[in-house]
Each structure stands twice: as C-alpha cells, then as structure tokens.
Amino acid sequence: MQNLTIEIGFDRFPPEHTCDGEDISPAIRVRGSDAPYLAVIVDDPDAPRGTFTHWLAWNVPATGEIPGGIPPEPRVSHPVPAVQGTNDFRRIGYGGPCPPKGASHRFFIRVWGLGRELDLPPGAGRSRLEGALAATATGYGETMAIYERRKVPGPRPPAGHRT
C-alpha cells in the first residue's frame, strides 16, 4: 500500500471549519497517490462516547487536493465530484469539530487512494465504507489537528461581594 502525505495547512482547526464558525470542510492536500480516486474519513477518537465520525466521502477524483467547502449533499458535482456518507451527527457531509467546551480533542483526517470508484450508495455509514476500503484501497495517509472550544466564563459576583 502506498504511503500518502496528507496536509491541511493548520495544526489547530480554525473556527470556520468547526461548529463555532461556518462548519465548512477544509482543503486537504494529498501527495504520493497514483490512484484515480480518494476516500476521506474525519474522526475524533477523544469523543466522550468513543470515536465520533465527522465526515465520510469517497469517489473523489485524485487531483492533488480535495478542495474546501464541499456542500453537505449526498452527491456533489462542485467544487469536485464526490459521494458523501452519514456522519455521527446523523447528517450527510462534513460536520466540523464540536467537542465539549474546555476539552481539547484530536481530529484525524484519514485519506485512502482508490484504484476504482466504490459502489456505495450516498448516505452509507462508516462500517460500509471501511468494508469497501479494505477491498479496494491502494494507499493511505493521515494527519491530525486539534480543536478546543473555549469555556464561557460564568457571571462575576457583584463588586464587594464575598464568597
């Protein structure tokens, strides 16, 4: 299996890629793949109830970069063709980092090279995608970034108030 180099241009998620901002998918640069298609899984292994899947996408043409801003639709034609699955928010498409306030979480961006398009319906879940990847992936790479939502400070006691 080929080793892919995955780059996202940051090590901490900017707010525009999270639930605290516009919640838009980031651009993902992919080097080292000679496969015609890519698949992506973005997940959070630090979620309170176990690994939380934020994005599933496949049949993305391997052009060196998966562009940012892929709309949350089952089949996408712009800015790049793709098929998207159902994330753990129970929505199709990208759902950005949204950990509990005050907790720093790691988010893995995992990319596979595919020798052919996957025959999975839009909205398929992670287990179906992983099963298809086991049979067709020709390359793999990952990167990681963190995100921490800031705690909102509580109200201050009135001046002169003793606690």
Image (spheres, rainbow, N blue to C red):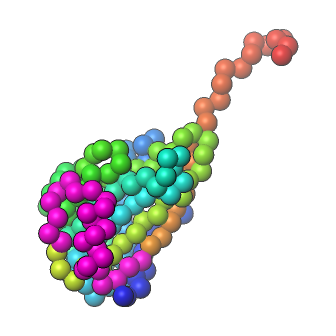
Locate the N terminus by quadrant. Answer: bottom left
Q: Quadrant of residue 101?
A: top right
Task: Name the spot of residue 127 as percent of width and height, x first.
Answer: 31, 61
In the shown orientation, is residue 28 left or right of residue 85? right
Along the horizontal axis of the image, is 147 left or right of 137? Answer: right
87 or 128, nearer to the observer: 128
Q: Which residues are magenta?
A: 118-141
Q: Quadrant of the C terminus?
A: top right
Position above or below: 84 against 149: below
Relative image position of residue 141 (x, y in whole percent) = 42, 77
x%, y% of residue 150? 59, 40
Left or right, 33 with reference to 49: left
- At 46% from the left and 55% from the top, the residue drawn is 51
Give the quadrant of residue 28.
bottom left
Residue 26 visible: yes
In this view, the residue in front, 31 or 41, is: 41
Tell me the residue at 30%/84% (across/down): 138
Q: Is residue 139 magenta?
A: yes
